[in-house]
Amino acid sequence: CEIDVYLSDPITFRFTSSACYNITYCYIFLQIFSALQHNVEMFQILIVIILFFLLNKISKFEEICDKSELKYLDDIEPQCGRKYDLLLLGKTGNGKSSTGNSILGYKAFVASAKSTSVTNGIERKSNKFKDTILNVVDTPGVLDTAALYEVVNGSTTRKIIQQLQEAVEINPRGYNACILVAKYGNRFTKEESDAIHMLKQIFGEDFMRHFCVLVMTNGDTFEAEENDFTFREWLYRQSGSINDVFHECGFRVVLFDNLTKDPKKK
């Protein structure tokens, strides 16, 4: 599995405190938003309060980062060898659960090609490779476009925020990396760009740059196309919003073939 190349520097981002509060407050704001959206005057006052609050939280978040909120795993649990904690995010149908299975080396999560999520809640599975422990947390379609655009009534958005908060709580150590799962051959839509924007609002503008690895599934399709260029060359030939995503995550992009039985290709 190529993904360990991007985990060689054992720095973990711990959104256990600051981001957890951000998620909780976002949930509260959405509830207030639902109640006041038809009262224009009160809604305008609410927007001013939210902007003031967000500016204050961003300032405090930067102070926390300056005070070594990012820690080395060796400093946290030096007696346990290496432990890597990965958070899987992506649309339903992109192969999140299958990617988790490939990373762990066994069928830890229920995977399906259906367009509806088979992951009902936050799931955490682990495996040990020599002296290294891998913990993978799967999320149920947090970036689904239908969910993101139900902001008007707030119900599904609140559910998304709750799921992200659960992901924080289920793994109090924090995460070494966020694995953003996309599908090779599928068009990268505006809705997916908006989903990434939402994540950056919650976890910080540097979220993609410092902590994301993009996994592109459907690698068997790329192999079947018999291209005269490598996958890495294909990455640099792309344009538009997907190219922006590649740049934001520092071209930490891995092609996965979750269907192959050859462990070297997974």
Image: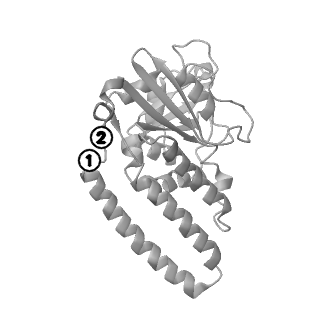
Q: Secondary structure beneath disc 1?
A: loop
Q: Residue furthest left?
A: 67
Identify which residue is drawn at 41% across, 39% down. Answer: 173
Q: Is residue 240 visible?
A: no
Which residue is under mark 2? Answer: 71
Amino acid type, mark 2:
Lys
The quadrant where residue 19 appears: bottom left
* Picture layout, residue 79 above or below residue 251: above
Amino acid type, mark 1:
Ser
Q: x and y percent of residue 207 in the render?
A: 40, 48
* Picture layout, residue 79 above or below residue 199: above
Q: x and y percent of residue 7 in the render?
A: 38, 29
Image disc number at residue 126: none
Q: Nearer the viewer, residue 83 or 38?
A: 83
Q: x and y percent of residue 82 in the render?
A: 36, 25
Lateral position of residue 234 relative to residue 109, left or right: left
**Quadrant where the C terminus is found in the figure:** top right
* Picture layout, residue 192 above or below residue 220: below
How has the structure been colored for display? one colour
Identify which residue is drawn at 54% across, 36% down. Answer: 137
The quadrant where residue 236 appears: top left
Q: Is residue 39 visible?
A: yes
Which residue is under mark 1? Answer: 68
**CB-based contact (under 8 Å), mark 2 and mark 1:** yes
Q: What is the CA distance from the residue labelled 2 to the residue labelled 1?
A: 6 Å
Identify which residue is drawn at 53% across, 16% down. Answer: 265
Q: x and y percent of residue 171 in the render?
A: 48, 40
Q: Residues within 10 Å of mark 1 (few under 14, many from 20)?
A: few
Q: Secondary structure beneath disc 2?
A: strand
Q: Residue furthest front?
A: 79
* Picture layout, residue 212 above or below residue 3: below
Q: Nearer the viewer, residue 225 or 35?
A: 35
